[in-house]
Image (cartoon, grey):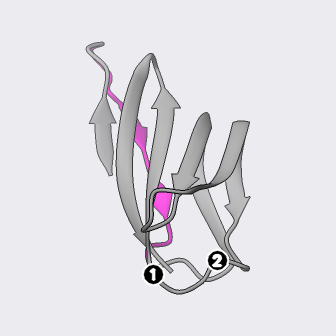
Amino acid sequence: MLRLGYSSRPVLLVVYPNPVEDVLSINQNVNLEVFDSTGRMIVSEMNTNAIDASLWAPGVYTVCIAFNNRMIIKKVIK
């Protein structure tokens, strides 16, 4: 769970579940890109709160999320 923003009420960004099996969810609509362990982009989505991970091979993935004028990077295990 990440706390973002400088307002009196921080915005929480939650990426779940981790590890993921079928669907990776985010509690806000975001723009995101997912990269595999070789650095190859496998997903690019705009204004989404869920992505299909069912066809991903087992491994560690890097999820780059654009949210509130920031870039957040999360590692996700499949």
Q: Which residue is drawn at 50% across and 65% down?
A: 36
The reply to whether the magenta stretch includes residue 11 is yes
Q: Do the residues labelled 1 and 2 touch (CB within 8 Å)?
A: yes
Q: In this view, does 9 lie above or below 49?
A: above
The image position of residue 39, as x and y in percent, is 46, 57
Q: Write down the quadrant of residue 51 in the picture.
A: bottom right
The image position of residue 15, as x and y in percent, is 47, 56
**SS class of the residue under badge 2?**
loop
Rate crowding at label 2 as few (under 14), some (14 to 19) or many (20 or more) other CA atoms within 10 Å. some
Over which residues does the magenta segment extend? Answer: 8-18
Q: How far apart are marks 1 and 2 (CA)?
A: 8 Å
36 left or right of 49 in image: left
Rate crowding at label 1 as few (under 14), some (14 to 19) or many (20 or more) other CA atoms within 10 Å. few
The image position of residue 32, as x and y in percent, is 58, 41
The answer to which of 63 and 29 lies nearer the viewer is 63
47 left or right of 37 in image: right
The image position of residue 37, as x and y in percent, is 42, 68
Q: Which amino acid does label 1 sit on?
A: Gly
Q: Residue at x 50, y 71 (%)?
A: 17
Q: Residue at x 64, y 77 (%)?
A: 56
In the picture of the structure, the residue carrying the numbered disc 1 is 59
Q: Residue at x 50, y 30 (%)?
A: 66
Q: Is residue 16 above or below residue 49?
A: below
The answer to which of 78 and 39 lies nearer the viewer is 39
**SS class of the residue under badge 1?**
loop
Q: Is residue 64 visible?
A: yes
The reply to whether the magenta stretch includes residue 6 is no
Q: Write down the quadrant of residue 18 in the picture.
A: bottom left
Q: Residue 77, labelled with which disc?
A: none
Q: Residue 56, labelled with which disc?
A: 2
Q: What residue type is labelled 2?
A: Trp
